[in-house]
Image: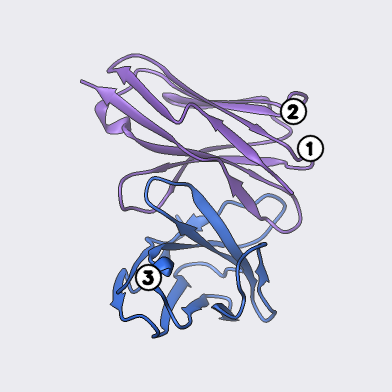
Chain colours: A blue, B purple
Amino acid sequence: GAVVSQHPSRVICKSGTSVKIECRSLDFQATTMFWYRQFPKQSLMLMATSNEGSKATYEQGVEKDKFLINHASLTLSTLTVTSAHPEDSSFYICSASSGGAAETQYFGPGTRLLVL
Amino acid sequence: GENVEQHPSTLSVQEGDSAVIKCTYSDSASNYFPWYKQELGKRPQLIIDIRSNVGEKKDQRIAVTLNKTAKHFSLHITETQPEDSAVYFCAAQAPGGFKTIFGAGTRLFVKA
């Protein structure tokens, strides 16, 4: 089956620093990647849709200057949390789709971010 | 935009019993409905999905039904086992952008 990796799995940083999270599709080309945020015991909240070679589409309420997304290739998308604050602490999960009429998304293992 | 409602939020069953989780969606254009299982601290795993041209789909102990008219879909797990304990999410996807909207999740406890 399709494999999606995410790195790092866990990161602790100081308030004000930036953190980059990588999402890779290992055995397929991902035309579209999605970034989600999940708070404890809550659902996955879509942050943005990332298409290779174009600007990401952000969901309402998500600051694009705060959460920078780059999808430079068909196998890699990155999410950078800029000037992180404690309220940005969360579980960030990416998913990837290879496109098609109705396409399954394959999730990465997630990145747990803790901002001190 | 799409809105997915999921019930119940918590479900506790005895091992061997059946579990049913129900979802509704708002966007009649949605045509793909996956179900994911997520264990604590892990990634969501697709367990079954159904497309809008099908009313029912079954895979061993898991089945999903879809009522397009009522915009309802449900997950049925039969002969539940303790390892079925997890959080289950329903989701709906509209055509075109593949954007998937998730329900709030159901925490299933299967008691041995």
Judge from the rendering whether residue A9 lies leftward or rightward of residue A23; answer left or right: left
Q: Disc 2 designates what residue?
A: B68
Please report, as a chain letter, where disc 3 is located: A
Judge from the rendering whether residue A99 lies leftward or rightward of residue A30; answer left or right: right
| Residue B102 place in picture, x, y as percent | 56, 45
**Residue in the foreground of this view, choosing between A57 and B31:** A57
Same chain for the residues at labels 1 and 3, yes or no?
A: no
Q: Disc 1 designates what residue?
A: B28
Circle 1: element type: loop
Residue B32 versus residue A11 in the image, above or below: above
Q: Residue at x 44, y 76 (%)?
A: A22
The quarter of the image holding the N terminus of chain A is bottom left
Residue A89 versus residue B108 in the image, above or below: below
Q: Disc 3 designates what residue?
A: A86
Q: Quadrant of residue A71?
A: bottom right
Say which amino acid is labelled 3: Pro
Give yes or no for contact between labels 2 and 1 (Cβ–Cβ under 8 Å).
yes
Please report, as a chain letter, where disc 1 is located: B
| Residue A44 place in picture, x, y as percent | 50, 52
Which of labels 3 and 2 is toward the front? 3
Please report, as a chain letter, where disc 2 is located: B
Same chain for the residues at labels 2 and 1, yes or no?
A: yes
